[in-house]
Amino acid sequence: EINYKPMPLEVISKSLLIQQGFPAIYQLKLKKEEIGPVTKVTLGKKNISKINKTILLVGESGAGKSTLINTMVNYTMGVKWEDKIWFQIVEEDGRNQSDSQTSDVIMYEIFGFEGKTMPFSLTIIDTPGFGDTRGIDYDTIVSHRLFDLFRSEDGVHEIHAVGLVMKATDNRVNDRLSYVLNSVMSLFGRNLENNIVALLTHSDGQRPRNVIEALEKTKIKCAKNEKNQPVYFLFDNCQNEDRTEEEDTEFLQIAEKISDKGMRALTEFLEKTAPTRVMTTAQVLNERISLMASIQNLQARIQLTEQKEMEINKIQEALKKHSEEMSRNENFTVEITEVYKAKEPTKGKKLMRLSFFEKAMCCTVCEENCHYPGCTLVPSPQHCELTSSACTICRECSFLPAIEMCS
């Protein structure tokens, strides 16, 4: 006899019905707050005596992270097929993939369901799709947002798993996915290698040979099983689909079992895997930010030099073209676009007494950007990750108190 306990009415009554049917789909009502530039979404109340596990999700846009998060939440809450309901924690607003709500780093906290299917509460960090159409500059900002989350007093201080979200139908690790992996490793370093696992969506339950071979061929640094193969978990992304048609019911039940098995295996992995402390990770992030700032400044200086060279070439061409007028001491007019550096205002996001993102640390002596973009949670220059109120670009002014914060 199966000991089945239906979902408490209290949870349903505090949710918003957005679609009737089988299953009935509810949007969970959540508490939202900002941790700097990161959004924290909380379901339930935290019990400090209970264990919490944190998983960071990364993947390409369209890999199915949002649906996977909803699957994790329903499993954590103890939702069963017999309940005929489905809860959404990720809001669907109809926008296209690149402009969806996952354009920001969002941290989901699920409390109060310990003991239903998991012996711990769950925190899920959802990152935007790395390598999407907005380019590398946007991915750099995402990296900074994660850094702000890790160093914030109310943020995350340890990671139990990094879930690389891929489709089970993928048969190769393309350049975009390689960019995802490189971004993750550059953020966290090799200290997270044993915590990185593959979460494969749209699975039919079979062993994903092509994905495993692709991961091994690309030499992905991740957790390995007893066969020295990448650790993976399978999920199907159709648990919330309509079940009223009889011919679909059997297939959807199989899909539910695939995801349920994947979540049970992932729960076991989280139980036995030691977390990685973010204090160590923060040092890696600081080094990366320092390197990125140097590269960004170098790129800007190279661009300025190239533009100056073009300006000089145009002047020389104009002088050669008007050499006859010059020999007769005649006046002539030439239009040349002059290239110069100028101070421009930045755009910011206000939160209480601090403003985030579009800040820049600028040297008033050499007129260079010491840190831009990416300087975020800093009320004054001495709090910047890279500066101590002295220029980080030029030796001539590196010991001068020449830094100012522009916003």
Image (cartoon, helix red, strand yellow):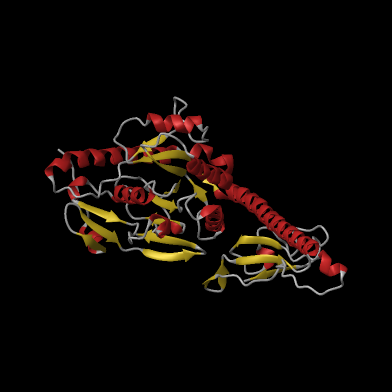
x 20%, y 39%: residue:
251
x 17%, y 42%: residue:
248
Q: Which of these two is toward me, 344 or 166?
A: 344
Rendering quarter of residue 399: bottom right
Residue 274 visible from this viewpoint: no
Left or right, 293 with reference to 87: right
Q: Which of these two is toward me, 86 or 95?
A: 95
Q: Which of these two is toward me, 40 or 405?
A: 405
Q: Residue 46 at what x, y percent from top left?
A: 39, 58
x 53%, y 35%: residue:
221
Task: Determine whether 279 is above or below 330 in the image.
Answer: above
Quadrant of the frame with the N terminus:
top left
Left or right, 280 with reference to 339: left
Q: Residue 155 at what x, y percent from top left?
A: 50, 58
Q: Residue 245 at what x, y percent from top left?
A: 13, 46
Q: Which of these two is toward me, 46 or 396?
A: 396
